[in-house]
């Protein structure tokens, strides 16, 4: 009987020890209060659209045939009857011209790196930083899949590597390499000059674009406003077809339209004369456009919005059918979790924060609500308002002003 009693007592004691250990562990590891830090945050009020670039363009006919080399880059201003390209009888000549241009670039880079001027670029550490930046730029190009700047990054990296060789005093064979390249360049130039190319001139004064896509005679800045919304939508959704036997085209003006179709419920966002920021897909640089005109009729459930752009570069010259994000405004403030919002005894909206082990209340004004979070106005320096890096209570019960939390 005594043995059975001792066994029961031992079991009870073991249960007590387990419970006590669990209680201590809970106190040690469990925190009934969850907090987060208020940080700055920005969100764009925007819509994603599909649209088409509209310009008034005159196609340059190919009167000679053969291969073409261009005198100007896209978006360059040209004058009427002035040369814009050369028509060569052989494709080989164009390839030689491309090779000659590459040689000329490499010669210039090597001459700059080997000159005494390169000593002015600073220490080896500085050049190492520049090489590192160029390598990162390479990585970005590969990661983004946008190879438009690949050539420039390659030339930049080659220049910095050559400068490092020059600055550190390491033996180099720049002069030998330059001579070899110059010999090849001069030989190519002689062959190029022996090809009697036909000169292609511009039919009018304007801005040169090398690509022709078939939309030139379908839509322009003049007939755009004669079309219905449904007709504009059809053009936006038409597949572009590369047009052969054309040299290029001349845009009449550096100003151009971007025309999009949007649901009627979004119409209130578009106000004539308002400036917006547009992020075209595949183009890193945002551009400012003006909402020029709204086209609305009963041929479609949508409306057509015409946006005017006054920026014309080679990158924009190649645009035709393109998607974009139209940004109407950017809202900035402090980001907090939606579950952190509380009300004090005066029914004022705010959050509890932990300030040096003491609970305090901070008033907030919500300016934007997202999925599971709010962006609140940052009233810098305002007493009793939420500030940057405040520690905000997200979870926890029985919170009140003045409570001390160890």
Image (tube, helix red, strand yellow):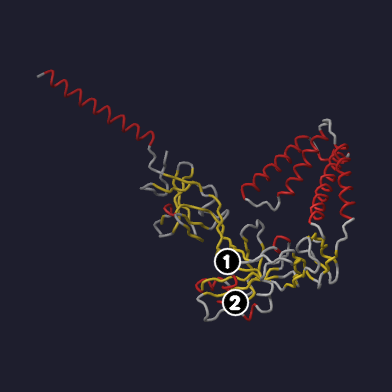
At 29% across and 30% down in the image, what residue appears? Answer: 20
345 vs 130, left or right, is: left
Q: Secondary structure at mark 2?
A: strand
Instruction: State the CA–CA distance, disc 1 to disc 2.
Output: 16 Å
The label nearer to you, 1 versus 2, is: 1
User: In the displayed image of the protein, which residue is found farthest to the left?
Assistant: 1
Tell me the quarter of the image containing the N terminus. Answer: top left
Sequence-wise, the earlier of marks 1 and 2 is: 1
**Residue 158 tag number:** none
Residue 131 horizontal/vertical position (percent): 73, 40
**331 vs 295, nearest the viewer:** 295
Tell me the quarter of the image containing the C terminus. Answer: top left
At 39% across and 49% down in the image, what residue appears? Answer: 400
Residue 57 horizontal/vertical position (percent): 73, 72
**Residue 294 tag number:** 2
365 vs 178, left or right, is: left
Mark 2 closeness class: few <14, some 14–19, many ≥20 residues within 10 Å: some
**289 vs 244, nearest the viewer:** 244
Total numbered labels placed on residues in the image: 2
Mark 1 closeness class: few <14, some 14–19, many ≥20 residues within 10 Å: some
Residue receiving disc 1? 50
Name the image quarter holding residue 269.
Answer: bottom right
Residue 313 horizontal/vertical position (percent): 73, 62
At 45% across and 41% down in the image, what residue appears? Answer: 357
Q: Secondary structure at mark 1?
A: strand
């Amino acid at each position: 009987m005594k043995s059975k009693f001792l066994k029961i007592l031992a079991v009870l004691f073991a249960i007590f020890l387990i419970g006590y250990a669990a209680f201590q562990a809970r106190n040690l590891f469990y925190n009934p209060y969850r907090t987060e830090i208020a940080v700055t945050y920005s969100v764009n009020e925007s819509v994603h659209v599909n649209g088409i670039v509209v310009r008034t363009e005159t196609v340059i006919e190919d009167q000679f045939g053969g291969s073409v080399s261009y005198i100007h880059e896209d978006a360059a201003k040209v004058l009427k009857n002035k040369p814009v390209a050369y028509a060569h009888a052989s494709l080989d000549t164009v390839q030689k011209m491309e090779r000659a241009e590459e040689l000329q670039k490499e010669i210039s880079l090597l001459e700059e790196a080997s000159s005494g001027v390169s000593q002015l670029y600073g220490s080896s550490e500085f050049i190492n930083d520049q090489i590192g930046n160029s390598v990162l730029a390479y990585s970005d190009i590969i990661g983004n899949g946008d190879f438009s700047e690949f050539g420039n990054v390659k030339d930049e990296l080659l220049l910095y590597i050559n400068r490092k060789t020059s600055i550190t005093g390491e033996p180099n064979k720049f002069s030998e390499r330059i001579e070899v390249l110059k010999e090849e360049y001069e030989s190519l130039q002689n062959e190029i000059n022996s090809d009697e190319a036909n000169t292609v001139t511009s039919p009018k004064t304007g801005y040169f674009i090398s690509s022709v896509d078939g939309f030139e005679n379908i839509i322009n800045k003049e007939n755009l406003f004669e079309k219905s919304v449904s007709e504009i939508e059809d053009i936006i959704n038409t597949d572009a077809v590369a047009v052969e036997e054309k040299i290029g085209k001349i845009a009449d003006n550096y100003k151009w339209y971007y025309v999009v179709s949007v649901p009627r419920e979004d119409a209130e966002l578009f106000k004539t004369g308002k400036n917006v920021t547009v992020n075209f897909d595949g183009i890193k640089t945002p551009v400012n456009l003006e909402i020029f005109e709204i086209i609305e009729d009963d041929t479609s459930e949508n409306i057509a919005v015409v946006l005017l752009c006054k920026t014309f570069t080679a990158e924009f010259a190649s645009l035709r059918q393109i998607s974009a994000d139209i940004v109407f405004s950017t809202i900035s403030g402090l980001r907090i979790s939606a579950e952190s919002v509380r009300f004090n005894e005066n029914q004022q909206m705010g959050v509890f924060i932990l300030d040096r082990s003491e609970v305090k209340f901070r008033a907030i004004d919500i300016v934007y609500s997202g999925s599971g979070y709010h962006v609140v106005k940052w009233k810098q320096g305002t007493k009793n308002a939420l500030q940057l890096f405040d520690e905000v209570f997200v979870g926890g019960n029985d919170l009140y002003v003045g409570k001390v939390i160890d």
